[in-house]
Image (cartoon, coloured by chain):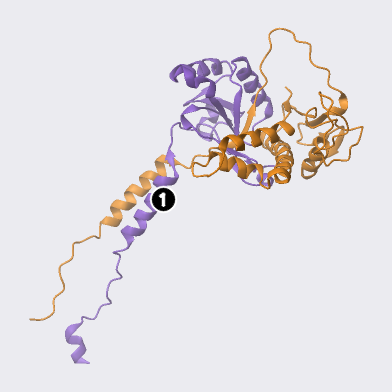
Amino acid sequence: MAKFNKKKSGDLPAISTASLPDIVFMLLFFFMVATTMRETTLKIENKLPFADQVEKLDKKDLIMYIYIGKPQEAFQSKYGNESRIQLNDKFAELADIKSFIAAERASKREELVPFLTVALKVDEKANMGLVSDVKQELRKENALKINYTTKKGDISGNVKK
Amino acid sequence: MAKRSAPEVNAGSMADIAFLLLIFFLVTTTIETDTGLNRRLPPIDDEKVEPPIIREKNIFTVLINGKDQLMVEDELMELKDLRKAAVEFLDNGGGVDSQGNKCDYCNGKKDPASSDHPDKAIISLKNERETKYGTYISVQNELVAAYNQLRDRRAMDLYGKTLKEMEANYSDVNWVGNKENLKEKIEKIKIEYPQKLSEVQ
């Protein structure tokens, strides 16, 4: 016994954590590749509905986003809990859509303007009334290409109530 | 001399650095959803154009009320039956199109009381202000699915491929084949089953 004790001390050898950085780096690279930087801060709840007949949106720079949904809890005292429109970083009224579209169009090169698409990111619990109003407003502005942004999945995932 | 291991560089804090980066990326990024249902809104006409006369039997009315119930052709319907009903309506082919051609690719019942031709068949989707957006999207999805189903069937019959595969081939740069030809084929199918889905305000 004493023969062995000479070489080794009594405590257990430490578990090697040498591969931990590799694992974490792997996770890091996954997230870097699979995600994009958040451009707008959402002030509304935005739980998109599911659909399975979806098409992919390409040309990310040619998309104007309009968000609709209930204000998040932090904003409810100020903005109430009815569905609201959010353009860029702030809450907007129906009338603001006109200037929003104009501003987006002005920021793009002229030949690309006809390809601009409006992506409607609407919370699944929002009422169609507001969405219809927005659609009407877009028709007035002649922004006719729209996309109802949805998550890919079965429609049974959509709320029934 | 006794066997001695080479001194190691201490990499213990590497994990901490990587975790820091990881958490930074987790917080600042989102997984962006970039899929959806593409639609085209009808333009607003300033001048009063006489709307074309469309016969009642060529219109398939879908109404969603404020309680998210579905009324299809004046009857209550469950969402799961909608796709089948829409396919039956579109594929009926009971009459002739605007040029007087019969629909020779329809597999429907040729019911004279239903739509004449896929070219004339229109689905009209109405909703109330209280309708939930989730339900509306479900219904839109089912109606688009009905069109896709018919187009896929036609594409299978003609070219032995679904429309989705053809479109994937078309956008694939490595695909070997005649792209012009393929585009024509895709267009042909889209013309045979045109997506006439009207969203009424």
Q: Quadrant of the C terminus of chain B?
A: top right
Of the residues shown, which amino acid type is indicated by label 1? Phe
Q: Is residue A50 left or right of residue A111?
A: right
Where is B22 relative to A45, above or below? Answer: below
Residue B95 coordinates in the image, percent (x, y)? 88, 30
Q: Callout 1: helix, strand or loop?
A: helix
Residue B168 coordinates in the image, percent (x, y)? 57, 42
Residue at x 53% of width, y 37% of height: B34
Where is A2 relative to A143, above or below? Answer: below
Q: Read off the residue under disc 1.
A: A30
Residue at x 15% of width, y 67% of height: B7
> Would you identify the image quadrant in which residue B151 lies?
top right
Residue A156 coordinates in the image, percent (x, y)? 69, 46
User: Chain for mark 1?
Assistant: A
Q: Is residue B183 visible?
A: yes
**Count of numbered circles in the view:** 1
Q: Quadrant of the N terminus of chain B?
A: bottom left
Q: Colour of chain B?
A: orange
Q: Is residue B194 visible?
A: no
> Would you identify the image quadrant in which residue B194 lies?
top right
Residue B18 coordinates in the image, percent (x, y)? 31, 52
